[in-house]
Amino acid sequence: MNPNQPVALITGAARGIGRSIALNLAEAGYAIVANDLSFPPSGGNESGLRREVEDRNSRFHPVELDISDLDRHDRLIRESLDAFGRIDFLVNNAGIAPARRLDILETTPESYDRLMEVNARGPFFLSQRVGRLMIRQKASLGSDYRPGIVFITSISAAVSSPSRAEYCVSKAALSHAAALFAHRLAEHGIGVYEIRPGIIRTAMTEPVRKKYDRLIEEGLVPQNRWGCPEDIGKAVASLARGDFAFATGSVFEISGGMQMRRLE
Ligand code: NAD
């Protein structure tokens, strides 16, 4: 393993899209700091992910914490630096759906606040801290250091679903945060990108699997299938490799063509 490997910090990496991002970035040569709410001691087990990362000849460090707890962001950054000495790439992936889908006329302030805290406020302030660190590291590490930040938002940043309005609002806020950080950090050579996944088969979409099976069968997705975590993991790895080095502030929708307005 290369001790000078670039380092990626991925939030919500225990399963689903975040896990695939971690594995694709390990494959692309990054050491992996994987954050998740569900790692020990809170629950779960990170040994499977560790093995898969190490099988890709990469280094792995797990950090258990709730990304909405801003007081613990310092610890996340400190642990990343203690483990691997630098952070090159941040992927703001951790996110939650409403515990219960309720119509916009019924939904609660508690659900609204929780989604905003996890999906928008947490990644906003983590990116602020990591952005400041990246500016300092750029000065010390020189031209080999190619920092970047990715925000995993959703088609829900722009598509209306009144049965989970707070999710849509949180992702619209996160989308604008991505644009703002892209603008502010461009002069420091830090690329910032938004990835908007469409309908991806993960634990998050399991409760509505049958509904989406039917909608996809009826033609909702032009490419006529569910997305899989690998569709997103590969796209993030492509950004990390620098394939889109002149595209900061871009929005990449990965939804099998759902962004197309259609008339047939
Ligand atoms: P998932 O529920 O399968 O996995 C999310 C992971 O994030 C879990 O391991 C969970 O423990 C972790 N997590 C949740 N809250 C956290 C917190 N506060 N702090 C730290 N970790 C936390 O979800 P997924 O489908 O893999 O979604 C990943 C991201 O992609 C989310 O931001 C989601 O909104 C977004 N997204 C998903 C879809 C989809 O169809 N699955 C579509 C568009 C966008």
Image (tube, rainbow, N blue to C red):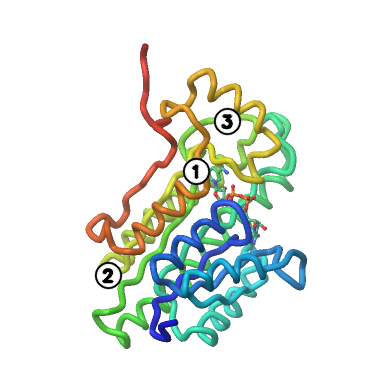
- What is the secondary structure assignment of the residue under circle 2? loop
Looking at the image, residue 62 sits to the left or right of residue 221; the answer is right
Q: Which residue is mark 1?
A: 154
**Amino acid type at mark 3:** Ser
Q: In the rendered structure, which disc, 1 or 2, sits on the residue that comes first in sequence?
A: 1
Q: Quadrant of the C terminus?
A: top left
Q: Position of residue 122 (x, y in %)?
A: 58, 62
**Amino acid type at mark 2:** Gly
Q: In the rendered structure, which disc, 2 or 3, sits on the residue that comes first in sequence?
A: 3
Asked if the beta carbon under badge 2 is closer than 8 A to the nearest atom of ligand 1, the reply is no
**Amino acid type at mark 1:** Ser
Residue 161 has which mark? 3
Q: What's the CA distance linking mark 3 and mark 1?
A: 12 Å
| Residue name at image x 52 percent, y 56 percent | 20
For the residue carrying disc 1, how many other residues have a C-alpha within 10 Å: few (<14), some (14-19), or many (20+)?
Answer: many
| Residue name at image x 53 percent, y 73 percent | 54
Q: In the rendered structure, which disc, 3 or 1, sits on the residue that comes first in sequence?
A: 1
For the residue carrying disc 2, how many other residues have a C-alpha within 10 Å: few (<14), some (14-19), or many (20+)?
Answer: some
| Residue name at image x 61 percent, y 66 percent | 49
Q: Position of residue 96 (x, y in %)?
A: 64, 50
Q: What's the CA distance linking mark 2 and mark 3?
A: 36 Å
Residue 189 has which mark? 2
| Residue name at image x 41 percent, y 53 percent | 234
Q: What's the CA distance linking mark 1 and mark 2?
A: 25 Å
Q: Position of residue 128 (x, y in %)?
A: 46, 69
